[in-house]
Image (spheres, rainbow, N blue to C red):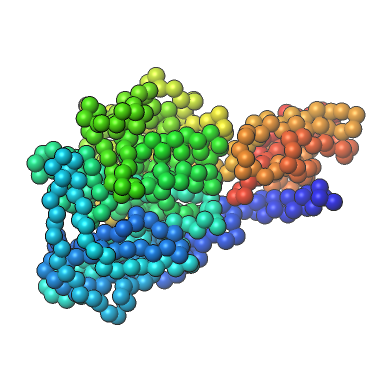
Amino acid sequence: MRVRALFVVAAATLALICAGNAAHPASAGFRGDNPIVAENAKPGDNGWAAEQAPFRYVEGYTSEVSAAPGDSVHFHVQTTPAARYRIKVYRLGWYGGEGGRLVTCLPSCTSDEQGQPQSLPPYDQTTGLVRAGWPVTDTLQIGSDWVSGYYVAKLTLTGGSAAGQGSTVPLIIRESPRRASTILVQAPVATWQAYDSWGGRSLYSSFNGVGSNHVSFDRPYVHGEQDLFEWEYQLVRFLEREGYDVSYTTSVDVDANPGELQRHRLYMTAGHDEYWTKGVRDALEAARAAGTNLAFMGGNTGYWQIRYEDNRRTVVEYRVRGNDPEPNPALKTTLFRLLGPPRPECELLGVQWQSGIGLQSDLRVVDASLGDPWFRGTGFTGGSTVARLIGGEWDGIQPGCTTPPLTVFFHFGGSGDKGPADMTRYIADSGARVFDASTLRFGWGLDSYGTGLPGADTRLQQFMRNALDDLTRPAAPATLVARKGRRGVSLLITRHGDTRVRWVAVYRHVGAEAFGINDPNAVLVCATRKTRCVDRRPQPTIVRYAAIVRDSWRASYPTLSDPLVR
């Protein structure tokens, strides 16, 4: 009885999958409770893009880089000179092109509160660390119905010469632990912090020409320095406009909870995700080994290893390795490729940064890859280019790096002392597909908001839809062998070791040609949790079988047997 119940449930579910496979990419993930579509159907509000106030007029930070539904977020706000202000909290997304939605206000959307000046503290002479240390001025309660996403709090002045102007405090709202979206996007908050020069200090140069080796999240962000609107927001708009089942986290949260990656089918970085801890790199390698697909959606990714202190409120990175007092060579703060032993980025990403910085150029299609399914229906042809997609920083193939065979989709040959760029994919031993977009400007090709480009590239958008249709699926069975026997046809399925796969289904089709499971002549033979089943029905002269696996999000592409002749 249990076997028949499984068969009936599997058949019904697979029918839905077949229907969904022919639908718009918004159905990717096929979860009936995808909150992204409903959220983006709500009326939008572009007030999140309010005019920036002069430096120090109103600024603040939060005690948390992220929060989940039910959590509290604590704001530290100052106004110089003393002035009244209001906090407007927006969720960023598509919202019919408005790009955001007003969620709530503090103290309310019709009242304000008095702000007070706070000092700009001195930095530590040894580490360069600057902590604002201001008191909590406002507390935000995250509602149980808040949808995971990029949020911004606009600290808005309500009076004086700068009334209506403000500053931005970013906040990531994570998904409820009771739900696991198909796609998990990581916001690169450690990289935001590395470049933030508030208080005159960052991990780079500062007012005395020497970078800090400690920087704190307990301070505001300087407007325009590696903020989310330059490299990340365009990806968010694309994903949410298309209706993908996506949730968001941060590089701090992945370090704290590395197992989170394996609760999703696809992990994506957003933008410039340069600074990782050992914990983040370890988590990604473990996720790949477990069959989680990875997509690195920028450039110069996972380049520097950092550490955290003060309960992950302080980023530690000694630019000169010899200055780092950490005795464990695996925890030193340096380039991943210079660790002891080395961990070159290309061994995970497929590519790595090689002096790709500082110019604007086009990416050219690699003609030999045009037959790949990811190019299907894009309109790309031999010699096609994507205009101005090279920019910021970018990554290229590292000769001699140990990687599985790479499929190269787009290439830039470099210019002078500026290195090459290669957009690649490889398949890991676990069946996980690993994609690297190579360039910080990749998201600009998907959505051009705030980029100065004339518009998104519709060909690249379709390429990304195709890629995500693949990356949101489990790996297909490695092999399917059909063998005739006295009791029927024995079907042997070799699966990858992904523990999230629930069961296998095998279909039969008359003839020797390749077929898809939604072919009207495809017949479901078995649905099983095992790796073997038997087709006991009388067979025509020539048949072929296809096997898929199913996880909690989607079904894999089919793996075909050789034709079987009776």
Residue at point 39%, 68% (across, down): 141
Image coordinates for residue 245, horizontal then vertical, percent: 51, 55
Q: Position of residue 422 (x, y in %)?
A: 38, 32
Q: Residue furthest bottom?
A: 110
The extreme right residue here reads: 486
Task: Please determine whether, in this image, residue 498 is positioned above or below residue 85.
Answer: above
Q: Is residue 51 among the parts visible in the rendering?
A: no
The reply, left or right, for residue 192 in relation to residue 369 is left
Front residue of 308 and 551: 308
Q: Residue at x 25, y 44 (%)?
A: 194
**Foreground residue among 68 and 441:** 68
Query: Quick check: 109 above or below 541?
Result: below
Picture residue at 38% right of the left edge, 35% below the top: 278
Residue plotted at (20% across, 56% down): 132
State which quadrant residue 229 falls in: bottom left
Residue 243, how many percent across, how many down? 49, 57
Residue 164 figure quarter: bottom left
Locate residue 244 relative to residue 97 in the image: left or right: right
* Quadrant of the frame with the C terminus: top right
| Residue sticking out furthest to the left | 208
Choose between 555 and 145: the one closer to the eye.
145
Number of on-image labels: 0
Q: Is residue 13 above or below residue 349?
A: below
